[in-house]
Amino acid sequence: MTTAMDGKAISRIWFIADNGETVTFTMFATNTGDVREDAILVRSGEQLAPQGWTVAASKDTLALDPKETGVFTVAVTVPMDTSLAPANFLAHIGVTVQSGADPTVFSAKEIMVQVKSNFVIQMHPDFERQYANPGETVVYRVSVSNIGNLAGQAQINVEAQQPSQLGWVA
């Protein structure tokens, strides 16, 4: 009995994903031998995946007749934590099918997920008061956060959203 995973038969071997996103690979395994195999082991690579990454196969085993091809999926979730999945990080994950009858017979393919670069600035005004009495000055604070996974500099301009009215200063 021999097993094989045809690299051409994999739906995609590489995805670009955001932090927190799950991507799914469709995999095909063929029993290239001449006897039925009832317990072909599917190893999705979760033990060798980068720290914090979740990898899971849709099946633990396959049962295939000679020359029959089986299908399974492997889902990879990119961690939200940017220290575990920084921008442009490329995760290499090995997927293996292995004969249950003869552990020396196996086939492996590499799938890859690259973390998408996101420079995202979020601003939150802190309105303690939403009005001012005549002659009174009100100070508003605005919190600025980089919620993306890419460090960088940003120029922030603050301007009034409505045209100034007589007697108002923005």
Image (tube, grey):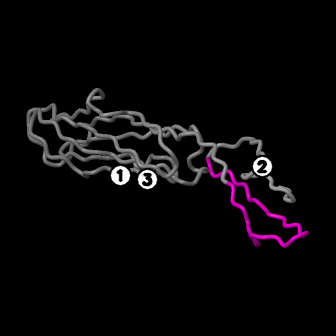
Residue positioned 52% across, 51% down in the render: 51
Q: Is residue 44 left or right of residue 98?
A: right
Q: Quadrant of the N terminus?
A: top left
Amino acid under label 2? Glu
Q: Where, by quadrant of the figure, is residue 30 drawn?
A: top left
Residue positioned 62% across, 46% down in the render: 149
Residue that mark 1 sits on? 56
Residue positioned 77% across, 70% down in the render: 131
Classify 10 Å Cα crowding around label 2: few (below 14), some (14-19), many (20 and above): few
Amino acid under label 3? Thr
User: Label 3, label 1: how many angstroms apart (C-alpha)?
Assistant: 7 Å
Residue that mark 2 sits on? 159
Res 54 label: 3
Q: Quadrant of the C terminus?
A: bottom right
Name the spot of residue 60 as percent of width and height, x first: 25, 52
User: Label 1, label 2: how many angstroms apart (C-alpha)?
Assistant: 49 Å
Amino acid under label 1? Ala
